[in-house]
Amino acid sequence: MKRLIRPGIQDLVPYPPGKPIEELERELGIQGSIKLASNENPLGPSPMALEAIRAKLNTLHRYPDGSGYYLKSKLSEKFHLPLDRILLGNGSNELIELIVRTFLEPGDEAVQPFPTFLVYEKIVKGAGGRMISVPLADFGLDLKAMVNALTPRTKILFVNNPNNPTGTILKKLELFQFLKNIPKEVIVVMDEAYVEFVTDPDFANGIELLGKHPGIIVLRTFSKLYGLAGLRIGYGFAREELADYINRVRQPFNANTLAQAAATAALDDRAFEEQTLHTVREGLQYLHERLDKMGLDYLPTQTNFFLIRVHPGGREVYEKLLREGVIVRAMDSYGLPEYIRINVGLPEENERFITTLKKVLTLT
């Protein structure tokens, strides 16, 4: 059987998703759990998105709009870019896979910071490529080291901004200078899944960078701010030529009907956007204040999640929190064994997390 599997596939490690609440409660025989592990929107989905879904339910016997015309038109209006520069995907994860399938050949290299979003390496290796990981510098992307890691075999460069799991960002001037040193034939993937949560005015917005390098592809998602993670809908922006090549590779109906309708409506749901951002910022302030009082170190963030350093280690604290019905993310798979990562929840969920964390640390 091993001879049937392409070299490298056996070495892949499945992506560790956040534990579903239903699975945890079934395993441990508990109820009333909370999940702060997957950087999801604690408010749920956009109400306008839900209304749009209900209106489309009686059309599910029809195939989706393969061109995504209405969603692309709404995105074009919002970001002032033509439709032929806009990409849609089954989550931004699929867009990452489409980029790799379009531009990377077996034996080619990709460069990423590390730790970062684990899916990059999984997809690159699954396509027969080689991932070059550049360690972070003080939890931020080491741009100089990333440039030095480029070789004639480098086809793709991943820049996760803000970076997951650290919540750190790159600023305009440093990224402008960085792009000057990137060969024009290298694809630069600017993954901005958490861009809407950024408050720093010096943040390097990928859309503003599209003209700075011919190979830039900007990726975004409806999973976080708009609360549509379960529908799997992401989008991106690229030069017309690059978008055309990617569209030749993608499946014709990769963005389903309900996802397109919900995302189109969510873009108009300003009240929900504001409520989400308010909830996240208030929640971060509360959590940081409580952690300061507990004397725990945490990483400042420009996202809806952040890292907390815990003793005796992230995995042990994660397991103890699990048994108390609080789901967070252990960071050992990211090379950060001393940390857990949490996302902001509802006020009562944030309070429960702090209370439970105090309890398990006291018992350690």
Image (cartoon, rainbow, N blue to C red):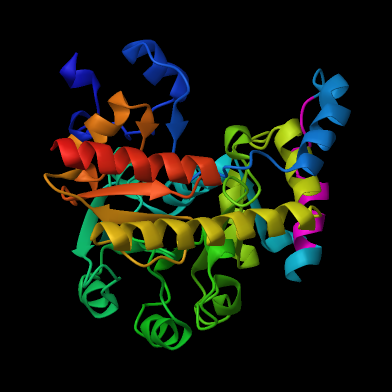
Question: For the point 68% across and 58% down, which residue is it?
Answer: 86
Q: Position of residue 143 (x, y in %)?
A: 29, 77
The part of the chain drawn in magenta is 63-76
80 to the left or right of 224 = right
The one of 26 and 251 positioned closer to us in this rendering = 26
Whether residue 312 is situated above or below residue 282 in the rendered picture: above
Looking at the picture, how far across and down is residue 332, in whole percent?
Answer: 19, 44
Quadrant of the image occupied by residue 287: bottom left
Note whether residue 172 is visible. Answer: yes
191 in relation to 345, above or below: below
Viewer-nearest residue: 154 or 258: 258
Residue 237: give x, y in percent of width and height. Answer: 61, 62
Residue 292, quarter of the rendered image: bottom left
* Quadrant, the C terminus: top left
For residue 68: magenta?
Answer: yes
**Any magenta on residue 284?**
no
Residue 182 drawn above or below residue 226: below
Towards the viewer: 134 or 32: 32
Q: Is residue 192 left or right of residue 45?
A: left
**Residue 171 on image: x %, y %:** 44, 81
Viewer-side residue, 321 vs 83: 321
Q: Is residue 108 left or right of residue 83?
A: left
Q: Residue at x 68, y 39 (%)?
A: 45
211 is higher (above) or lower (below) than 330: below
